[in-house]
Amino acid sequence: MKTRFYLTFVAMFLALTFIFSGCGGGDSGTISPYAGSYEGTYTGDDTGTWKVTVSLYGVVSGSLISSQIGYVTVSGAVRHTGELDAVAGGGGDNGSYFVGAIDADENVYGLWENPTTYQDGTFSGRKTGD
């Protein structure tokens, strides 16, 4: 009985691992032409600076420094088309959402919004390294 439970548990764990391994954000299995380091600023109802890294698979990770709340983590994804979606602060009730793009000249731009605090604005930046 314990063996059957253990095998079922292991099978479910492996199945979930395979299912979610492709959910890292970017286009799974495709090398992103946008991989590298980026930094910039955001303005509006809050202001600050941000720095992120885009992985080879389009996964975005980094941080921003808010004039209102200080250090906040950033995560998200860049599609092979350059479309960018990210969230600062983990999303949910206190997160800010960033939607934008990276263009062919390696410029980053878009809009941000925090629906809980009714704050919004724009962001921009540039690629700073590979």
Image (spheres, rainbow, N blue to C red):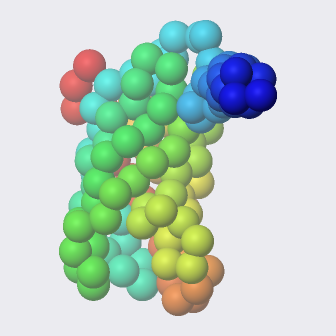
Residue 95 visible from this viewpoint: yes
Q: Quadrant of residue 64?
A: bottom left
Left or right of 119: which side holds 8? right
Residue sitting at the far front: 1
Residue at image point 57% right, 31% down = 24
Q: Nearer the viewer, residue 106 or 70?
A: 70
Residue at image point 48% right, 16% down = 33
**With respect to residue 24, does 89 lie above or below?**
below
Quarter in which the C terminus is drawn: top left
In this rendering, the count of numbered labels is 0
Q: Nearer the viewer, residue 96 or 90?
A: 90
Left or right of 33: which side holds 67? left
Q: Position of residue 1 (x, y in %)?
A: 77, 28
Residue sitting at the far bottom: 117
Residue at image point 42% right, 84% down = 45
Left or right of 88: which side holds 23? right
Q: Nearer the viewer, residue 88 or 81?
A: 88
Left or right of 49: which side holds 23? right
**With respect to residue 115, does 102 lie above or below?**
above
Residue 15 visible from this viewpoint: no
Q: Position of residue 125 (x, y in %)?
A: 34, 47
Residue at image point 39% right, 53% down = 74
Q: Quadrant of residue 12?
A: top right
Q: Nearer the viewer, residue 107 or 19?
A: 19
Q: Position of residue 107 (x, y in %)?
A: 40, 38
